[in-house]
Image (cartoon, rainbow, N blue to C red):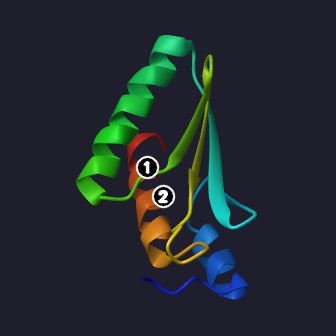
Amino acid sequence: MSKTLTDPELQTALGSLHGWAKNGIAIERKYEFKDFLEAMKFVNKVADAAEAAGHHPDIQIVYSRVTLQLTSHDSGGVTHRDIKMAGRLNEIHP
């Protein structure tokens, strides 16, 4: 189990993660795509990255809008693992 980040640590980390913000015990980013198919192509890339990392975001899809949330459930909050995964997801779609 990883240690959850303190609020100052989390704010510092979020400063370098475009589009991500704290939402409760998670970090979240919202994406807007041209249409449903583009959104699903992105979600499939997210799934591949999540499987490779062994760390899976919560995913909400509403037509062309996708919301990703990351939290370390075993730690009860955001850890360095979530920050690293958010960075990887930003590589997929800056």
Residue 33 or 68: which is nearer the viewer? 68
Residue 91 vertical placement versus 6 (above, below): above
- The residue at which mark 1 appears reads as 89
Residue 1 or 69: which is nearer the viewer? 1
At mark 2, the secondary structure is: helix
Q: CA distance from mark 1 to mark 2?
A: 5 Å
Residue 44 vertical placement versus 33 (above, below): below
Q: Amino acid at mark 2?
A: Ala
Q: Residue at x 51, y 68 (%)?
A: 72
Residue 55 or 33: which is nearer the viewer? 55
Q: Residue at x 35, y 39 (%)?
A: 47
Query: As drawn, which residue projects farthest toward the front?
Result: 74
Q: Position of residue 3 (x, y in %)?
A: 51, 87
Disc 1 packing (10 Å; few <14; some 14–19; many ≥20):
many
- The residue at which mark 2 appears reads as 86
Q: Visible in this render: residue 19?
A: no
Q: Are marks 1 and 2 in contact (CB under 8 Å)?
A: yes
Q: Amino acid at mark 1?
A: Leu
